[in-house]
Amino acid sequence: MYKYGHAYWKKGAFRQAYRDKLNVFMGHLNLGERTIRGCLEAYSCKHAGTDKRLSLSLENEMLDYLGKSSDTDSSSPVDLLLSRSSRKALIYLVLTLYQMYPDYDFSAVKAHQFFSEESWDTFTQIFNNYMFEASKEWTARNEDGSLLEAIYEALDEVVKLAECEIYVYNPNPNADPFLEEGAIWSFCFLFYNRKLKRVAGFRFCCISNLASDAFLADTPPYGEDEDIFADMDM
């Protein structure tokens, strides 16, 4: 596989504890009839092993699509495929999904169809709309800024947001890991820094407690069984 290791974070530093605090808060936020679940993760991408075959397959699929497409619309996914560096970025995003959802098969994902490039303003708008209640709860429990500001700082520490390309994963109903878990809505944003060769992911969803009590009882919150943002050799 691509050797995805967790991105470097200084152990014992304040910011690591702050990031851990975020993941604990979002791991299982019960709001009565609904539960918010979210997680911040970061990966460093290095070539190794069998995922090279997947990378080649994705590259060939994108080139084939590019060759057959006659779509001239400027918003077409063709625009994302014109340069090799952009195709490589999309491949990294698919491979990151495999790490974020290790029990889910993304072999049917078409990179050019499932990712759209966004801005921080777009992320902010979506976050404010869907995480409004979670943000209020964060403010009630903490005195160190808003939830959005905390997430910004945590992401910026690892991937330097000013240098990032921001993507959102837009699957169809057959390729959404959250739908089978009783989600009301879900989002997965990926922040890619080409220079650092790091991808940070922020996934968050809302689950109906009435529809998924059994699932939530059997599933630990995000981050409980892994050391997210742990040290690694860069």
Image (cartoon, rainbow, N blue to C red):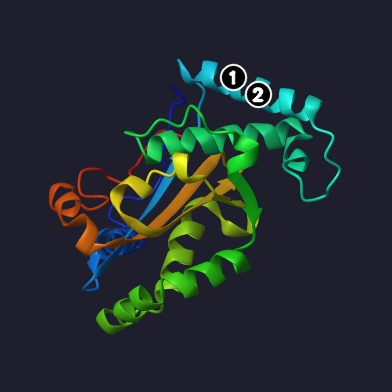
Q: Of the residues shown, which amino acid type is indicated by label 1?
A: Ser
Q: Secondary structure at mark 2?
A: helix
Establish if 228 lies above or below 50. Answer: below
Q: Which residue is mark 1?
A: 57
Q: Is residue 104 left or right of residue 29?
A: right
In percent of width and height, residue 215 lies at 19, 50
In percent of width and height, residue 99 lies at 39, 36
Q: Are marks 1 and 2 in contact (CB under 8 Å)?
A: yes
Q: Which residue is mark 2?
A: 61
Q: On the image, which quarter does residue 145 sit in?
A: bottom left
Establish if 144 lies above or below 213. Answer: below
Q: Residue at x 47, y 45 (%)?
A: 173
Establish if 38 lies above or below 140. Answer: above
Image disc number at residue 46: none
In percent of width and height, residue 25 lies at 27, 65
Q: Considering the image in quadrants, where does the N terminus appear? A: top left
Q: Residue at x 63, y 40 (%)?
A: 113
Q: Of the residues shown, which amino acid type is indicated by label 2?
A: Glu
Q: Secondary structure at mark 1?
A: helix
Q: Is residue 164 visible?
A: no
Establish if 215 lies above or below 146. Answer: above
Q: On the image, which quarter does residue 202 sit in?
A: bottom left
Q: Residue at x 16, y 57 (%)?
A: 213
Give the crowd class for mark 1: few <14, some 14-19, many >=20 residues within 10 Å.
some
Q: Is residue 123 visible?
A: yes
Q: Is residue 63 left or right of residue 23?
A: right
Nearest the viewer among 25 and 195 is 25
